[in-house]
Image (cartoon, helix red, strand yellow):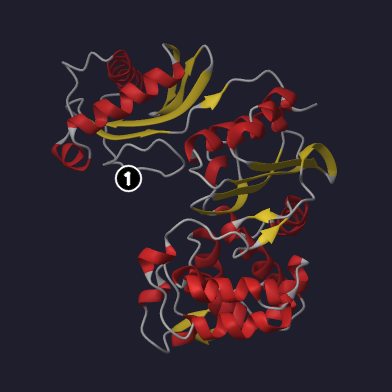
Amino acid sequence: MKVFFGAALAAVVTVCLPGPAAAQEAERAVLKALLSGDTRNVEVTEEFARAVPEAQLDGLLETLRAQIGPVEEIELEGGSGILRSATYQVPVKITLDPAGRIAGLRLGAPEPLVADLRAAVAGLAGLGAEVSWLVTREGEVLAAGGAAHPLAVGSAFKLGILSVLARDVRAGKTDWDRVLRLGESHRSLPSGRLQDFPDEAPVTLHTAALLMIAESDNTATDLLLDLLGRDTVAEELEIAPEALLSTREFFALKSDPAAAQAWLDAEPQDRPAIAAEAALMPPDPAAAAARSVPGIEWYLPLERLCALLVPMAELPMLQLNPGPAYGLGPAAYKGGSEPGVLNFTVALRDAEERPLCAALTVNDPGVIDEQAATGAFRALLRRALAQP
């Protein structure tokens, strides 16, 4: 069992307590003790203790208390709910075993309590050196800042690949059950799992698309990009073909400073050959995980990301991982991140079933506080959903 401050979800053990009322009271009592710092009577299961040592749990809770202040209200139903202080609310999920010990605990990113959409927008600008945001409803812009300016968006560019693929399926040019064969040239670095599959492993289009979106599988991405063609995907993204890197090329250039500089200095028509040559060798994971290299990324405006996502929002692979929209209703999501780059792009519907898109991009040469960005973006989503 793990405690997370952010969008990831902890695995939990499902147990049965005497009844809903008794279970809820027990869960509330444990949460009150944790949040007060008085944990003398709080016990955890052995599995939870192995995953989250006591010192780690105490440190996480101390950080949370310092950030949000005293918790004034705990709303719970079935172990899930909200912790609310004077200035923040925090999604929470707790699971107790029959003996009342903590078996699972999930704490989401603290979300600032804001009065309206304008106040939510005000909390975005300080997230990084360059920040853009966009909220649309039925195509009408409700809030925007730099939404037409391309910034680095990481894996959010994969929406362009999915858009082309979904269009081809609708047109009858291909089928979701078509099988592709994994080749060495497709093998990229994680995130994902296909990089560990053997050569010539059969993968359906549906599986590749699902992994590309829900798990941001980079090898699945390059497999689909190879099938659909760089020119076609670049046109869908509204960028120049020579600016569209495969993920393997991206990691290879980041791994090799000389190749990266050569790519940046080259004329546009010469860049594909430089990237392809760099990608002949498997990328170095440690070097590829370093800070982002300005210019070597996928640069897209939020306007384009929302234009791609909204028409595809009903595709199941977009709804498996709601990202920062967890708990806010059915949502289609794709984001992206690497050191210095963060993007969230979400499509969902308000209470009147009006389609909304909300997106945020942060670029910064330093460290981006992803927890703060998640909380601020959730506040934006919540106020957008409530906008008359």
Residue 293 position by quadrant: bottom right
Q: Residue at x 70, y 59 (%)?
A: 312
State the residue lying farthest toward the left. Answer: 46
Q: Residue at x 21, y 25 (%)?
A: 100
Q: How many marks?
A: 1
User: Can residue 17 be seen from the camera position used here?
Assistant: no
Residue 158 drawn above or below residue 171 = above
| Residue on which the image places disc 1 | 11
Describe the element under mark 1 as helix, strand or loop.
loop
Q: Residue at x 43, y 22 (%)?
A: 76
Left or right: 332 as drawn, with respect to 202: right
Residue 108 position by quadrant: top left
Residue 339 drawn above or below residue 96 = below
Q: Nearer the viewer, residue 252 or 137?
A: 252
Left or right: 31 as drawn, with respect to 174: left
Q: Give the image location of residue 365, x and y in percent.
A: 54, 48
Quadrant showing the N terminus: top left
Residue 195 drawn above or below residue 78 = below
Q: Give the image location of residue 216, x and y in percent.
A: 51, 62
Q: Which class describes the residues within 10 Å of circle 1: few (<14), some (14-19), or many (20+)? A: few
Quadrant showing the C terminus: top right
Residue 293 drawn above or below residue 141 = below
Left or right: 127 as drawn, with respect to 240: left
Residue 194 position by quadrant: bottom left
Q: Residue at x 70, y 56 (%)?
A: 309
User: Can residue 286 be seen from the camera position used here?
Assistant: yes
Q: Give the image location of residue 75, x and y in percent.
A: 46, 19
Task: Name the kind of residue labelled 1 in the image.
Answer: Ala
State the residue lying farthest toward the right. Answer: 140
Q: Give the image location of residue 78, x and y in percent.
A: 40, 29
